[in-house]
Image (cartoon, rainbow, N blue to C red):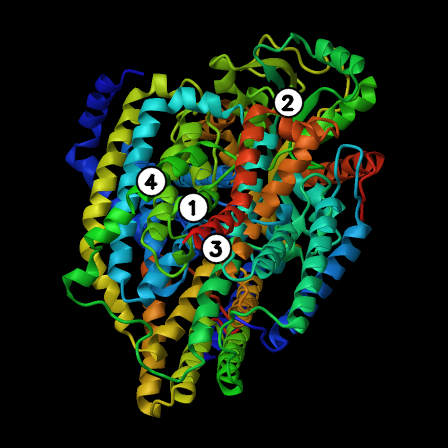
């Protein structure tokens, strides 16, 4: 045990959640707290908003003070970066799916992951991407009759 | 209800070759549907309804029911292997199931899930058969104050799911409560937190959050490293593919716990299989001698929730068949199916159509056996999924998640939210916020608020109604006990240390 | 890309042919939009219609159900509006859509944007209490409510639902007061009544039928213009002495905005023929629906009147009406 360094992650996340709590409280104030028939829509959010704000501030306070002793190894910049890149790629894929349709967007995404993120040679990467897209096509719309997101271009 | 003649009557119907075939088809289809995240029994049953008009109604309900409880078996597969909840109730199985897989015990986890599901499923059918009408009537005593107490008990379980930081667990739970409030307030039709989007009027689908936070969060965390190797150790050899004796022994109480808790919760129309799984898991952890190991991959952490969500199907059929009161989306559509076929569900249905009821009961026994026999040998096959290198497996998981979410609502908005929750899941992992309390808050928040407000409407503002009714009072007392458990344990440990 | 161009060309070439006064005839499966999920009220109705159409061979193509649940009908509404110009898409309609669009600022389109096709059926309702309740007539219940304001409770749906409207109308008419407790599902409402936690509820006749037969519920009055065949001994609201507007749950068919005259005429014709079949008549009877068949023009006028009435009721109850 022993005191750790101020955990920046905890301080920042605590502050963000505290902000959320504050937002919830402000919204909850706009709605009826106690109506004619019973508690209104503002009742519950007000209370959990307050709890959220209080606990989040507590978290920030204890983290600045010394933090909890046990915590996972803080990821290094590069690794977090990789994960975030993957996430951005996923977001782009979802966005592209509205335009190009799921199959095409997913194929591109897979290609990106295999070739760029895992640095596989280009030809096998394309094969994997096409293979996955075809597999999804065969499994979902064809075999299971489950619709895949269609894009503007109709795929 | 005379059980023995009923069973004989049912056996005569259920054990005919054609009905055995329908049962088999139903459970296989159900398993496949359960494995697929997002796609669930309600949509599948709806798709098959037109075909059932050509069939004998008893055969049809045997098949559709097979889909219903078969899906519960399948839901555990992706939960354990990929941390992707196949069904909302399978979320709890992800906790220890996936942890077991990470330790190389994926086969054992799948086996325990199958065995627990079998034991609990059979218990559920027994319960349905023996206690249906009186239990349904007894369940009517449950109303909003009792449901409120039950939800409080559920939320009290947070302290058992907390892990290292109680504050973070509570914050995660509160965020879950907030997500649950997004949408339309039932009583006043006020829109809350919808930001003007009509897609949010019905709230955020649980599936979107669960898959995003669990599956996507996990995969993103794994993508930090560029290793192309397989994600998890692949179990080889029979010993690693099936549960060991010691593991099975550890699950003895869990089998009972899951069966009973799941069935009783299932009988209540206002509580569903997700609550049943959480409660069963919480009970198991509360009585365990080594609670701190939960979450690291203990077999009973898989057995309890898996059992609960299976016996819940038997329980949910109790109010549906005896009072025409559905307790979930699946039972609602089964009820609609019965109406479409010309039955009139209600208090007299079992008396007037004993063949259908008993045929269904016997087929459920048979179905559970079929599922056990099907699932156990498939374990080595499923485990092979783990062999796939990361760069194939991860895009596939992403793809399956998107398709699964889209299949529920057909909404690109939901897909966008899924991606957003994926980021949240990743961040929570990095910052050490436990995900289970968030899911717990999400599942319970809505029901709890509704129950509270309904109760106060019933009592015209008198808070006393929440504790003055006997059932509610007992449940609330249990909640207080649960809240006290960690402190009790700490005090006990301190006492032990002082003595020793 | 090429495929899209080809489709565009085909559509472009096809249009003049149908506009030449040939009359519309469907050439691909019909998309039948439903605003509930599988198993919900309109879903069951739509599936029945699809099956009946097939059985009676009223359509040259088959019908496919598309579930677009959410937002109290808003999702389905928005979807139908998107399908403007598509003669192969129609949807089931309920009065709920009108209420939802009146109350929700999030609604970007309203029922007035759609093309009314036909009104099919009116769902009456009955007022029930638990079988051992001390009230044998509606009057007894109302008097008890007057004597104990706010003590008696009714279980029902959310604000704007038919049971809420009935409660508003009755309380306004009689001066009695009782609590209205919303439950999200019909099952929970029934459970609340049977468990003795609420005293009264408004319920559809076929749902109540089995409970009445089984002895768990007692009917006090029926919300209909004429006595239903299934309840010959039960007074209607008017007969019981409460002359309030009968608020039906309306089910009908609508088409995307601006549907051309011949398309509407085609659908009207198909549904007229459906309404005349024995299959349909039996369906109405089994479900205790009233035959409220109206053609497009009449239906449109009805929608306007209904909107006005709901707007007035909601305003009176203090609910925020946005349009």
Is residue C293 positioned above or below B395 on the image?
Answer: above
Instruction: Report the residue marked by disc 4.
Output: B64
Q: What chain letter is assigned to the residue under label 2?
A: C
Residue A2, how many percent across, how many down? Answer: 55, 72
State how far apart marks 4 and 2 are (Cα): 34 Å
Instruction: Report the residue marked by disc 2.
Output: C198
Instruction: Name the image quarter holding residue C141.
Output: top right
Residue A98, how many percent across, how many down? Answer: 54, 71
- Mark 4–mark 3 CB contact (< 8 Å): no
Q: Dot 2, how many residues are within 10 Å of its Cα: few (below 14), some (14-19), or many (20+)?
A: many
- Give the total of numbered labels: 4
Is residue B93 positioned above or below C273 on the image?
Answer: below
Which disc number belongs to residue C160?
none
State how far apart marks 4 and 3 are (Cα): 19 Å
Of labels 1 and 3, the one closer to you:
1
Considering the numbered disc 3 on the image, is that residue within a helix, a strand or a loop? helix
Instruction: Report the residue marked by disc 3.
Output: B408
Q: What chain letter is assigned to the residue under label 1?
A: B
Q: What chain letter is assigned to the residue under label 3?
A: B
């Amino acid at each position: 045990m022993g005191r750790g360094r101020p955990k920046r992650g905890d301080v920042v996340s605590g502050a963000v959640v505290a902000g959320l709590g504050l937002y919830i409280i402000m919204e909850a104030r706009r709605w009826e707290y106690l109506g004619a028939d019973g508690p209104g829509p503002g009742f519950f959010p007000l209370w959990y908003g307050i709890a959220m704000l209080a606990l989040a501030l507590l978290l920030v306070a204890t983290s600045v003070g010394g933090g909890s002793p046990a915590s996972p190894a803080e990821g290094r910049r590069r690794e977090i970066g990789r994960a975030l890149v993957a996430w951005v790629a996923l977001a782009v894929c979802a966005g592209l799916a509205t335009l190009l349709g799921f199959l095409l967007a997913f194929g591109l995404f897979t290609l990106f992951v295999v070739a760029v993120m895992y640095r596989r040679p280009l030809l096998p990467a394309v094969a994997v991407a096409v293979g996955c897209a075809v597999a999804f096509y065969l499994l979902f719309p064809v075999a299971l009759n489950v619709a895949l997101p269609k894009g503007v271009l109709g795929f | 209800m005379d059980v023995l003649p009923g069973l004989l009557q049912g056996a005569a119907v259920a054990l005919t070759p054609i009905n055995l075939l329908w049962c088999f088809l139903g459970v296989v289809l159900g398993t496949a549907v359960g494995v697929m995240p997002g796609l669930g029994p309600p949509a599948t049953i709806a798709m098959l309804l037109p075909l059932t008009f050509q069939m004998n109604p008893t055969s049809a309900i045997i098949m559709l029911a097979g889909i219903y409880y078969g899906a519960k078996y399948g839901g555990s597969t992706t939960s354990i292997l990929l941390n992707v909840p196949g069904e909302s109730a399978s979320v709890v199985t992800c906790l220890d199931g996936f942890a077991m897989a990470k330790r190389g015990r994926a086969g054992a986890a799948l086996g325990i899930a199958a065995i627990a599901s079998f034991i609990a499923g059979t218990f559920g059918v027994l319960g349905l058969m023996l206690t249906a009408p009186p239990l349904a009537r007894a369940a009517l005593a449950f109303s909003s104050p009792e449901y409120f107490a039950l939800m409080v008990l559920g939320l009290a379980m947070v302290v058992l799911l907390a892990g290292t930081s109680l504050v973070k667990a509570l914050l995660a739970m509160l965020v879950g409560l907030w997500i649950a409030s997004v949408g339309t307030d039932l009583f006043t039709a006020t829109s809350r937190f919808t930001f003007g989007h009509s897609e949010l009027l019905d709230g955020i689908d649980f599936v979107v959050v669960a898959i995003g936070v669990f599956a996507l969060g996990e995969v993103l965390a794994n993508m930090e490293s560029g290793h192309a190797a397989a994600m998890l150790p692949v179990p080889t050899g029979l010993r690693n593919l099936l549960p060991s004796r010691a593991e099975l022994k550890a699950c003895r109480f869990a089998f009972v716990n899951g069966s009973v808790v799941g069935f009783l919760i299932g009988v209540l129309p206002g509580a569903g299989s997700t609550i049943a799984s959480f409660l069963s898991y919480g009970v198991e952890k509360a009585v365990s001698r080594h609670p701190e190991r939960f979450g690291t991959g203990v077999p009973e952490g898989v057995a309890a929730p898996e059992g609960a969500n299976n016996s819940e199907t038997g329980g949910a059929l109790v109010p549906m068949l005896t009072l025409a009161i559905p307790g979930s989306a699946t039972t609602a559509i089964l009820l609609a199916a019965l109406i479409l076929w010309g039955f009139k569900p209600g208090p007299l249905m079992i008396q007037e159509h004993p063949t259908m009821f008993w045929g269904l009961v016997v087929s459920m026994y048979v179905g559970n056996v079929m599922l056990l026999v099907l699932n156990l040998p498939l374990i080595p096959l499923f485990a092979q999924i783990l062999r796939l290198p990361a760069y194939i497996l991860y895009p596939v998981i992403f793809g399956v998640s998107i398709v699964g979410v889209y299949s529920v609502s057909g909404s690109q908005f939901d897909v966008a939210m899924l991606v957003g929750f994926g980021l949240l899941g990743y961040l929570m992992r990095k910052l050490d916020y436990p995900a289970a309390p968030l899911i717990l808050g999400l599942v319970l928040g809505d029901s709890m608020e509704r129950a509270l407000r309904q109760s106060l409407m019933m009592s015209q503002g008198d808070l006393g109604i929440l504790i003055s009714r006997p059932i509610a009072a007992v449940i609330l007392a249990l909640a207080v006990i649960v809240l006290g458990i960690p402190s009790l344990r700490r005090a006990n440990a301190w006492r032990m240390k002082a003595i020793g | 890309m090429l495929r899209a161009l080809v489709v565009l060309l085909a559509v472009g070439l096809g249009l003049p042919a149908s506009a030449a006064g040939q009359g519309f005839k469907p050439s691909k499966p019909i998309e039948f939009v439903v605003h509930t999920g599988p198993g919900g009220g309109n879903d069951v109705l739509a599936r029945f219609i699809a099956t009946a159409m097939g059985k009676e061979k009223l359509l040259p193509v088959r019908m496919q159900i598309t579930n677009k649940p959410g937002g109290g009908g808003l999702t389905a509404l928005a979807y139908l509006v998107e399908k403007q110009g598509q003669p192969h898409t129609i949807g089931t309609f309920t009065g709920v859509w009108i209420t939802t669009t009146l109350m929700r600022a999030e609604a970007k389109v309203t029922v007035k944007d759609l093309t009314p096709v036909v009104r099919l059926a009116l769902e009456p309702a009955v007022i029930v209490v638990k079988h051992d309740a001390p009230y044998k007539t509606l009057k007894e219940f109302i008097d008890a409510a007057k004597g104990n304001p706010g003590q008696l409770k009714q279980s029902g749906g959310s604000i704007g639902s038919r049971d809420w409207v009935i409660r508003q109308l009755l309380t306004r008419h009689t001066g009695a007061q009782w609590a209205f407790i919303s439950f999200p599902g019909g099952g929970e409402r029934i459970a609340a009544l049977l468990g003795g936690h609420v005293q009264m509820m408004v319920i559809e006749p076929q749902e109540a039928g089995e409970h009445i037969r089984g002895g768990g519920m007692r009917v006090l009055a029926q919300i209909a213009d004429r006595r239903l065949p299934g309840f010959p001994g039960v007074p209607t609201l008017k007969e019981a002495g409460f002359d309030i507007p009968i608020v039906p749950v309306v089910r009908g068919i609508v088409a995307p905005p601006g549907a051309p005259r011949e398309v509407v005429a085609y659908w009207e014709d198909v549904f007229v023929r459906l309404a005349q079949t024995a299959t349909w008549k039996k369906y109405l009877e089994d479900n205790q629906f009233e035959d409220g068949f109206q053609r497009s023009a009449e239906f449109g006028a009805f929608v306007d009147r209904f909107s006005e009435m709901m707007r007035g009721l909601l305003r009176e109850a203090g609910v925020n009406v946005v349009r």
